[in-house]
Amino acid sequence: MRSVQNIYGRILEAIITPKKYPGAQGTEIINMKGMLIEATINLWETVSKRLLPTPTKFHYEFNIRDLARVFSGICRVAYAYEFKIIQTCSRLKEKIPAQLFMIGLWRHECERTFVDKLITYGDKKIFMDMLNKITKEKFRDACGFDDDMLMTDMLFADF
């Protein structure tokens, strides 16, 4: 898994840089890279072990492409730094801290990537429970947000 961390770490380092994200708020965003990578890999491993393929769910194959899809979505938003979407949270209905925006963006991309494969409400609930648990474990203490803030769905207007 170290090699996977290095791959996505390098990609995020190239896109989320101090030049593109200056100031204290930019530093907070830059410091989240490691947490996002660790949380994504942890979620991917958990989903891969828990939601196994069966004859009726033969497509429950979770591979490295799923990680790429999560990071691709984050990178699309981060790459558009000139639009200051992350810094100003400009596409939200209400103003929130940039770190919380990044966590919400990460959750959104994880849901989009993994939940779209799942076919039963039970499996979707299992996934959401895993996502909520990992969100709390990885971001609550590190970022100082309470559970209610971490678990609220992002209010993206038009992503």
Image: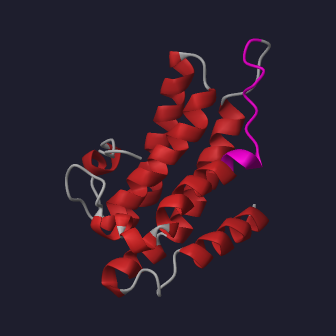
Q: Which residues are magenta?
A: 56-67
Q: How many marks?
A: 0
Taking depth in this image into account, of 74 and 99 the one nearest to the observer is: 74
Q: Position of residue 97 (x, y in %)?
A: 27, 64
Image-based side of 69 in relation to 145, left or right: right
Picture layout, residue 140 above or below residue 129:
below
Residue at left offset 68%, top offset 45%: 66
Q: Residue at x 65, y 45 (%)?
A: 44
Residue 63 within the segment the image draws in magenta: yes
Decide: is 151 above or below 142. above
Q: Residue at x 52, y 75 (%)?
A: 16
Residue 2 picture location, percent across and down: 75, 67
Colouring of the image: secondary structure
Please identify the dominant SS of the magenta region. loop
Say which of 136 and 3 sits in front.
Answer: 3
Left or right position of 64 against 34: right
Find out whether residue 30 is within the magenta segment: no
Q: Of 111 and 84, which appears nearest the observer?
A: 84
Describe residue 154's horizontal placement relative to residue 133 as left or right.
left
Residue lying at the far left in this picture: please name it: 94
Q: Position of residue 80 (x, y in %)?
A: 47, 67
Image quarter in which the N terminus is found? bottom right
Residue 118 horizontal/vertical position (percent): 61, 24
Residue pictured at 59% horizontal, 60% vertical: 38
The residue most toward the top is 56
